[in-house]
Amino acid sequence: MIPEFIIDSEGDLTKKMSSFEIKTKGDRLVRLTNEADEAEKKIEEKRSKISIDLFGKPEDYMDFGSKSDRLEKEVISHNPLEEKAWFRFLKVVYVVLWIFGLGFVILLSYASEEFGTFVIGGFIVWGIMTLIKKAFFYIALGNK
């Protein structure tokens, strides 16, 4: 109502709406909203009957499951190797290599007393570790 009033008054905000006009428009808005709600309910009844005729009841073809079933499905690991002990061991080795690599870069930059050495060394360690990870998954899982 208000945007339409502003448009009708050509942007003049000093004009006032009468309380009768606001009440009339408000009543009309409520009436139209109620009519639309009733029409939507009638349409939904027909729509649900057609849906049941075409597909059957939703419980028959949709698996709603319990909440605990859904949570168990979400917890499933994406990597089939997660259950293997050697894979978890290699993950620990990978983290240790990261720590040693970054530690070496920190010592090297401390010895050279230049921040650029730290940045370049960090990128080199990151690149090497990324290549190691990609190569491992390519060999273990096949192109990933």
Image (cartoon, rainbow, N blue to C red):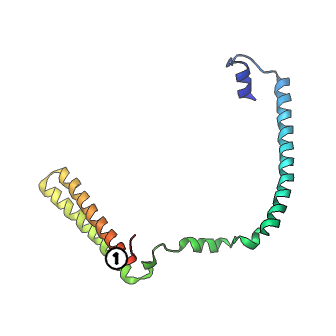
Closer to the camera in the image, 104 or 86: 86
Question: Is residue 90 found left or right of 65 in the rendered image?
Answer: left
Closer to the camera in the image, 55 or 90: 55
Q: How many marks?
A: 1
Determine which quarter of the picture holds residue 133.
Answer: bottom left
Vertical comparison of 58 with 4: above or below: below
Q: Residue furthest bottom?
A: 85
> Which residue has dot 1 on it?
139
Secondary structure of residue under mark 1: helix
- Residue located at (87% from left, 38% from top): 31
Q: Position of residue 10 (x, y in %)?
A: 69, 18
Q: Position of residue 86 (x, y in %)?
A: 36, 82
The 10 Å Cα crowd at callout 1, few under 14, some 14 to 19, many 20 or more, is: few
Question: Is residue 27 found left or right of 84 in the rendered image?
Answer: right
Question: Is residue 10 found left or right of 136 in the rendered image?
Answer: right
Q: Position of residue 68 (x, y in %)?
A: 63, 73
- Residue located at (54% from left, 72% from top): 75
Quadrant where the C terminus sits is: bottom left
Quadrant where the N terminus sits is: top right
Determine which quarter of the picture holds residue 23.
Answer: top right
Vertical comparison of 85 with 78: above or below: below
- Residue located at (20% from left, 61% from top): 105
Q: Amino acid at mark 1?
A: Ile
Q: Residue furthest left?
A: 112
Determine which quarter of the picture holds residue 82.
Answer: bottom left
Vertical comparison of 68 with 31: above or below: below
Closer to the camera in the image, 119 or 61: 61
Closer to the camera in the image, 15 or 4: 4
- Residue located at (83% from left, 44% from top): 36
Vertical comparison of 62 with 111: above or below: below
